[in-house]
Image (cartoon, coloured by chain):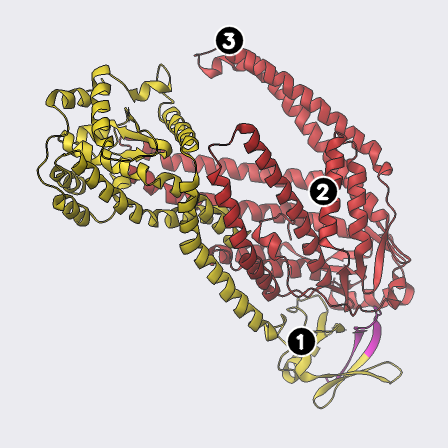
Amino acid sequence: MSASGTMDAIGTGLAEGRTGSDGPVAFTGGRGPLFRILVKNSVFNLLTLGIYRFWAKTWLRRYLWHNIAIRGEALEYTGRPAELLIGFLIAMAVLVPLAMVVGILDVAFLGGRSSEDASFGQLIYLIALLWLANFARYRVRRYKLTRTAWRGIRGGLDGSAVRYAWLAFGAGLLTVATAGLARPWMRTALQRYKTENSRYGIRNFSFAGKGSDLFARWLVVLVFLLLSLILFVWWMVAFTASIQGELGRDNFAAAPSLVVPALVGLGGLALLALSYMWYRVYEFRYFIGKTRLGDTCFDSDVRTSTILRYGSISGIVQLFLIIAIVFLASMAVAPMLSGISVSSEAIGALILPFLLVILVFTVVRLIVHYLLFYFPLARHVCVTLHISNLEAVEDIIQSTRADPKFGEGLADALDIDIGPV
Amino acid sequence: MLEFSAYYNDGRTAATRSVNVRLDTGCLNVQAPEGDVLARWLFDEVHLVDRPVPGQPIRLRRGDEGGERLIVADEEVLASLEAACPNLRRTLPGLGAHWRPIAIWSALAVASVILVLFVAIPLLAEQAAKAVPAELEQELGEAVARQLVNTLGARREGGADGIVCETPAGAAALDRLVERLAEGTESHVPFRVRVLDVPVVNALALPGGQIILFRGLLAFSENSEQLAGVLAHEMGHVIHRHTLEAMVKGAGIAALLGLVVGDFTGAAVITGLADAVITTSFTRDAEREADRAALRILAAAEIDSRPVADFFRRLETERVGGIDLPSLLSTHPPLPERTAAARAGAGGGSAAMTRSDWRALEGICG
């Protein structure tokens, strides 16, 4: 769409308040600019041993935000790399002594504890980490929302990260206690907290979702989970039985009797993964549909089949990549191993190229996944998003609340996964 | 082009309106179609929101804070704007007032890392290693030794245990040597020495008194005094709990690096490399300490320590059949230093083992 075309869209949108049959949200990005950004990010990240990552994240987010246009008017990302950098430095100054103490205590009691004590300690450690992860995620959300603007008006997130972390903790306990049945209620409760605390300007979003609406679909996933577990147990039993009967013999002799249960088990896992994806897409559509901003309503038409298509394409290409790398690597290594000398020098000489290959592979794989999956996914989500009554936002006023100055330090330091951007 | 049409957000409400913009002296004049002036943007404070993309309208923002925006379609306008506005191309707000907190927190973070890496971790590791009760350490050492035997002996026929050399005469000779050396120590744990059938010239001290000697070392030693020297060195590691301390330090350093390097693709590889480099640099002091302990033990057992100097010399100058000797050398103090120290140790003293015992030990791997 040309510049004048976009301006026309803005004008028409203003004049008529039309939404049209295709959603008013367009994704104007191209794969070329994205590719350049990703390559630049990867190269500089490695060269600066990771210090560039704050700039990398900023450029990537700017690309995404600035290419999402609602009725021709694009979003804006107002975050600065310096804010992420400071957030990280603060987290470092605070976390480093803490983590060191934890690490040392961990090893000092390593060998002697009885296995029950050790597993209990690890459980506590895991739970603490999960709590911290949710805490950090909420703060990341706050940073992103306050650095997002549309028509010059910024977003915001109220509420408390501590409360959210405890909410997630309680919900998690409940889910485990009910063997997973309570999960739709857990997801809804968390979504409600996040959504109703999110705002555009001074107007908060509202959320009308209920866990019971999701339960039927979730039950399907649980059924597949149970099926997969049963198949897995069957396969394990067959495997151990054949091992006991074939002690000392070459493994491959036992293979035929294992192939059928293994294939069935894999099939069960695939069905489980598909059903989970199907549930998540439905949940996404449901959550969007139950979200409102004052009188403005939202709707989403995202299709599981489309996501599946993008995922398969990306997955297949990555698989080819792995096979190619393994093939090339084994060709390069074979001549070295043909000699009998097992000198540590030879092994040392092998390690560096090996690491290099792994590095290159990880970067290439990431770029492929972004270009073949996240990019078309972003476009799809935008195009299938419908907003009605957009004019109602026009009387929203900019919030004068002070935004958090720095961002995301905890999530960055703890390597918490906050998604592709 | 001195005048153009645009869309305008006033940064106070979420409304977009059609406006006319005129380039006045020193500022952009934003006017509603009816003529009333909505805003005046000084040229200094006009910035592009992002680099102009052909085919997309140009967005301008006013200043670094605030939400006033102008959306312009005409790309020709860009030329006039560039001539008039000096700061137009500053798409990303600069550091501005941020440089102060960055400088402060950078200094704090760097100081924090340095302090922890070079002071706190070694100190606490030493204390933590001492605080571990002897029984716990022994259990840990047993577990590690078992793991090592299983790993190295994985492809053996008859199971992994086949890699442990245990001919009765050799084992008895070894026990006698160990007992003789142990008398000169005040070890908090009993020594348990094993010989593994691996053609590497090396020896390991694991936690809890576990010592591993490799067959290659036996073959490389010319006499029992040299072997006794290496054994005493490993005993020095055991007495000072170096291995346990190293494990604790390693865990601390790994955790620290994980935090610093943060989250990006390839981080795991970089972290692993850095971790390895930093950890080995810590062990020189430990090696010196073990060397001193070895000389003391040899002296207490009245064993001639001078052959040990020959051993070090040979380590440096000879290469045994293409097998490198990195592990004994790389993290150790420079060889001239070790050789001199060994020579300066007690001269005189007897042989470490009887000739028959030494022959039995040489044949311990059958």
x, y percent for residue A45 = 51, 56
Badge 3 element = helix
Q: In the rendered structure, does residue A23 fall within the stretch colored magenta?
A: no
Colour assigned to chain B in the rendering is yellow
Q: Quadrant of residue B171?
A: top left
The label shown at residue B47 is 1
- State which quadrant residue A176 falls in: top right
In space, the residues marked 1 and 2 are separated at their CA atoms by 45 Å
Name the residue nearer the viewer: B198 or A154: B198
Question: Which numbered disc, 1 or 3, marks the residue closer to the eye?
Answer: 3
Colour red maps to chain: A
Residue at image coords 58%, 17%: A259
**Amino acid at dot 1:** His
Assign a secondary structure to mark 1.
strand
Q: Is residue A342 left or right of residue A171?
A: left
Say if the magenta span includes residue B12: yes
Q: Name the residue under label 3.
A: A245
Q: Is residue B330 visible?
A: no
* Other-residue count near label 3 (Cα within 10 Å), few / some / many at <14 / 14–19 / ≥20: few
Q: Name the residue under label 2.
A: A169
Residue range of the region highlighted in magenta in the rendering: B1-19
Chain letter belonging to callout 2: A
In percent of width and height, residue A330 lies at: 41, 34
Where A2 falls versus B301 (above or below)?
below
Same chain letter for marks 1 and 2: no
Which residue is painted at 58% across and 46% down in the image?
Answer: A368
B163 or A314: nearer the eye?
Answer: B163
